[in-house]
Image (cartoon, grey):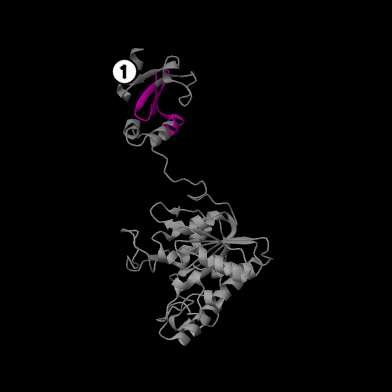
Amino acid sequence: MALLAGTSPGRRKGVVKWPLLPDEIADLAVQPDDLQAFRSSNDALRSVYDHFVSFICESIGSEISALEFAEFGCNSGYFLFSLLRRGALSAVGLDFTYNQLVFDFFNRKLGTQANFLFSEWDSFAHQPNHNAVPEVDVCLSIAVLCHLADPLHHLTYLCSRARRAVFVWTPSFPTDDLIMGFGQPAGFSNSLAWPLSFDNLVKPSRGLIELCLKESGFGDIHHINPIPTEFDAIDFWNVHTGIIAFRTSNARTVYSGGATTRVIPWDVPIELLAEEIPAAAQRVKRVWRSQPHLVDTIGGYNIVRLGNEWYAVPQGVPADFERDDPASIPGLIQGMTRDEVTQMVTRA
């Protein structure tokens, strides 16, 4: 498991070079400039990662043998394999790096059955491409939000896939203010077009992360407790937010049936919508026909405006504009303007 832990946040980065590399991961090998320093940093980072796993398990407070886990941006799967070794029922990782062979290798070596799905988060459509996150008990997001131009959408999506809890670890501002920071765009070679090119050091504040979790129905929030680490020199714990949040409600977000468009105002002329957005036109027809606007009462008629149409409805005559064709309503007077309808009423 030591070989899964990742790389140091310092200047020495890479993968520990084995004397005899398995063919499945030979292409991942690099030679650090100082192998011993790398191993030392790798050990320190692994202790932090293992602390994450312990925090997750202890916060859940019960056997994890009945729980399903998923991680978006799983890399080589360190956290998922760790959870399986501690008894998790199942674990699935999703990443834009194709790590199926790596997962196969560690499954054989560790006797686990972690699943891998190739997936990419689409920051333009605010949803995953290729494979969606399956519905599980616990979703993990570890050092992923910082690489996305739309981190709040992504975190909200993960919340919609978690039945019980979400664990998130990300660089952030240590404030309750609702702020967001961005590193320079196009930090990686495989970058997207502006403004999706914000792919590094995207930092939502701690308060913004908490708000996102609460609005997504995860109101029981617990912060990870820091442990000593050689990364203290960069104020490691203070510049990151680590939270496990438990579901407290079935909130209606954009990923769980919440509104994604505003109700179109009743007085918008329907013909302006019908030509360019027919679906919206149909929707507005339902909205404003169910909510007639009574403007005046003249000579035994109710003067009603529906969108850009004007009607005079005889008082006492039932008129359901949602259900009925206006022409079928007895005594109805229709006109293009209020003055036109009023004049027809006075002549009636």
Q: Position of residue 333 (x, y in %)?
A: 38, 17
Q: Secondary structure at mark 1?
A: helix
Amino acid type, residue under disc 1 in the picture: Gln
Residue 218 among those drawn in magenta: no
Mark 1, residues whose alpha carbon is within 10 Å: few (<14), some, or many (≥20)? few
Residue for point 44% across, 16% down: 328
Q: Can you identify the residue that label 1 sits on?
A: 343
**Quarter of the figure with the C terminus:** top left
Q: Is residue 208 above or below residue 308?
A: below
Q: Is residue 122 above or below residue 28?
A: above
Query: Left of 15 or right of it: where is 244?
Result: right
Q: Position of residue 92 (x, y in %)?
A: 56, 60
Among all residues in the image, which is located at the extreme top? 348
* First to last magenta residue range: 286-311
In front of the other: 271 or 138: 138
Residue 158 in sight in this render: yes
Q: Quadrant of residue 299?
A: top left
Q: Quadrant of residue 29?
A: bottom left
Q: Position of residue 317 (x, y in %)?
A: 48, 18
**Quarter of the figure with the N terminus:** bottom right
Q: Is residue 12 above or below residue 57?
A: below
Residue 220 in sight in this render: no
In front of the other: 127 or 290: 127
Q: Position of residue 157 (x, y in %)?
A: 49, 55
Query: Left of 72 or right of it: where is 345?
Result: left
Callout count = 1
Q: Quadrant of residue 308?
A: top left
